[in-house]
Image (cartoon, coloured by chain):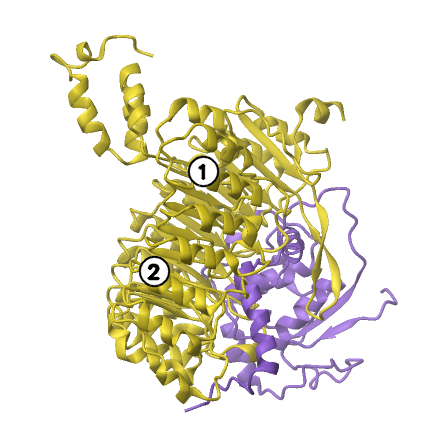
Amino acid sequence: MSRVAAVELDFFAMGKENKSSPSKPKFLNRQRSFRDIQSAISKINPELLKSVIASGSAAKKTTPENGNQFSNKSFPVPCTPKQEQPSFTALPLYSPLPRPSSEILPETAPLTIFYNGTVAVFNVPRDKAENILKLAEKGISMTSAELMTDLKTDQQQLFETLDEDLPIARRKSLQRFLEKRKGRLTSVSPYVFNAGRP
Amino acid sequence: MNNLNCSGCGVGGGMSDVVLECVMPYIHDPRDRDAVSLVCRRWYELDAITRRHVTIALCYSTSPDRLQRRFKHLESLKMKGKPRAAMFFNLIPEDWGGFVTPWVNEIAESFNCLKSLHFRRMIVKDSDLELLASSRGRVLEVLKLDKCSGFSTDGLSHIGRSCRQLRTLFLEESGIAEKDGDWLHELATNNTVLQTLNFYMTDLTKVRLEDLELLAKNCRSLVSLKISDFELLELVGFFRSASAIEEFCGGSFNEPDQPGKYAAVIFPPKLCRLGLTYMEKNVMSIVFPFASLLKKLDLLYVLLGTEDHCVLVQRCPNLEVLETRNVIGDRGLEALAQSCKRLKRLRIERGADEQEMEDVDGRVSQRGLIALAQGCLEIEYIAVYVSDITNAALEHLGAYSKNLNDFRLVLLDQEHMITDLPLDNGVRALLSGCEKLQRFGLYLRPGGLSDVGLGYIGQYSRHVRWMILGSVGESDEGLLAFSTGCPSLQKLEMRACCFTESALARAALQLTSLRYLWVHGYRETSTGHRDLLTMVRPFWNIELIPSRKVPTVNNAGQNVFDDNPAHILAYYSLAGPRTDFPDTVKPLDPAKVVAA
């Protein structure tokens, strides 16, 4: 096992039951009952978890045929806590766009997920880990659409670079008005915009 | 070209020239005229003699000489220069081009019948205006310098002094160097027939009240006046004099903490198109007495909140045109949908980004659009900046807005999460439902429209002639699918897209009606624009503005340099490549690219 510091992610606050866990995650201290967790699990869209896992294990590629298995099934929870090998590889993984060979994979570190008594470790680069942590922070009730847009693919990263260079432009006349308005607020009168005015 | 005598061609006898000369002048639509001119040589000549108006969509697509040779008796000319992006800061270099000088020179010499001139986004010099005034001043009736720049109030003085037949002087959004207010004095003293004067959004501050009042006195036909900032209280006398006025925009409220004073402002009785700069909630009531007459309302430069918008629009049942910022919010759109059943044009611009500068309710989303679609069935033009959007909103527009001919939607980047993306199905529904659509704009973000959705645009936009697309599609495949459709697309603008030069070039070749392409921000290949060579062909000019650093001010108020990616501009021209490039613009020279 590598000596690089592991980022521990306790998706469903199982950490308090697992006393052997080395360090508490910083932001997942929700007290949840087992029933809460079960109901939460049933709300998880399999597609979304599939993507979370797929983005974390970018090095693993499976054939796209597996990808359709999940469209109508509910999330298959590995039910025996004693299972040593989590059967995550049975989950269909969407294969991300093939990376050009010249691209160097960013440095990865292990990401450990405790789930229902099973443990999975992925080697993820820092940005993917942050994405997964962000997802967990936001809670489980998001739609898959929202999460899909959250995950960065190669294509989107390219887009976002372009977006930073190209913010949506504003018309000159409007720009000048908004600047003049700022000036007016200080000079003409104490015009304070208050939405709560009757 | 068919050399047959025209009275012999056509079925059974044809038409005599006399009949044709009587009928021709009634044909106005340029596309009809184009068709007429292709029938035979005689019809071409008749069209050339009788054509009254020509619009040159890009001044570099032809030359003054060619225009003169074909349309000697032209009465009205409109032309455009810089790309539309010039209306935003720092996208198009100020000296990009579009000089009116060669055209004015030709007009001074040859176009004896020219009465109406409209230059849009072009560079105009005082010397051009002086020449125009001296050569055509006696006949000129309409002069529009629309988003132009490069001239000063001295040039306008020449116009004011010499153009005594001027009915319309339009200067809106032009960049004018202001030396004094004499130009208005010249206009007011020398003209008695002026109907429209517009120097809105020009920042001219030295205009004198007595000249405005003189204008009102001398020009009894003055119907439309749009001015720069000018204290409204001073215009009380003017409004009393200018009793024929139907449109007024501009002014200013410099004493907003004394709203009672503004009760003294009595507006002219026929006023039905209005926009009052810096109008606040506490003086808004001055428009209530005639609000039910209002057909057009400009709230782009007011200081109102969402609730104020609701109150105001509810009093305007006859409103046909509304322009405002997104402070109107979804609630305002719902009020509009309820009260303004005659609404035809709606423009919602982007307000300030800072939260404290605009109403918290000041966001437009699918909620407002759905209400609008269902409530305002006569809508023809919608331009809107939204904070959130769904497919359902676009589907509603496709279902209800059957008169829509111009639709532009920009998705702001304030919200991280958008309710419903991609918009593939909504876009398809809108394009197939709105059969009259001719102009279409869609500016989204990564994930906003997939390659399939982009293909839908190609498939379902049968009559669309102009498009601006920003941040759409996922890959070159999307663009290529798009470009197999769009049968009517003449002008395409694209921004922040992920397509390669190779795909852009191939798309340009595939779009059958394309005559103008502008792209800013694309996937630059590192081979010195070599891939653009794919679209090299006769009469197709290709120009580049290479990527450069542009000075700007960031959010912290610091002067910084922004990276400005490369622009590609390509267009058909009968005049060959330009000869007036500034340093920032380079023609694509195939020989040089290949050699590199």
Circle nearer the N terminus (2, 1):
1
Toward the viewer: B554 or B179?
Answer: B179
Q: Which residue is mark 1?
A: B57
Residue B481 in sight here: yes
Toward the viewer: A106 or B406?
Answer: B406
Residue B365 in sight here: no
Query: Image point 47% across, 77% down: which residue?
Result: B303
Q: Is residue A32 above or below residue B327?
A: below
Query: What x and y, as percent, mark residue B547?
Result: 70, 44
* Crowd around label 2: few <14 · some 14–19 · many ≥20 (10 Å): some
Q: CA distance from mark 2 to mark 1?
A: 36 Å
Instruction: Look at the image and give the colour of chain A.
Output: purple
Query: Image point 76% across, 27% down: which residue?
Result: B596
Query: What x and y, as percent, mark residue B7?
Result: 18, 12
Please tell me the numbered disc located at residue B218: 2
Left or right, B227 with reference to A180: left
Query: Image point 31% across, 19% down: which residue?
Result: B45
Q: Chain of mark 1?
A: B
Amino acid at dot 2? Asn
* Element under disc 1: loop
Tally of numbered discs: 2
- Residue at the farthest bottom position: A198
Q: Identify the image quadrant of residue A20.
A: bottom right
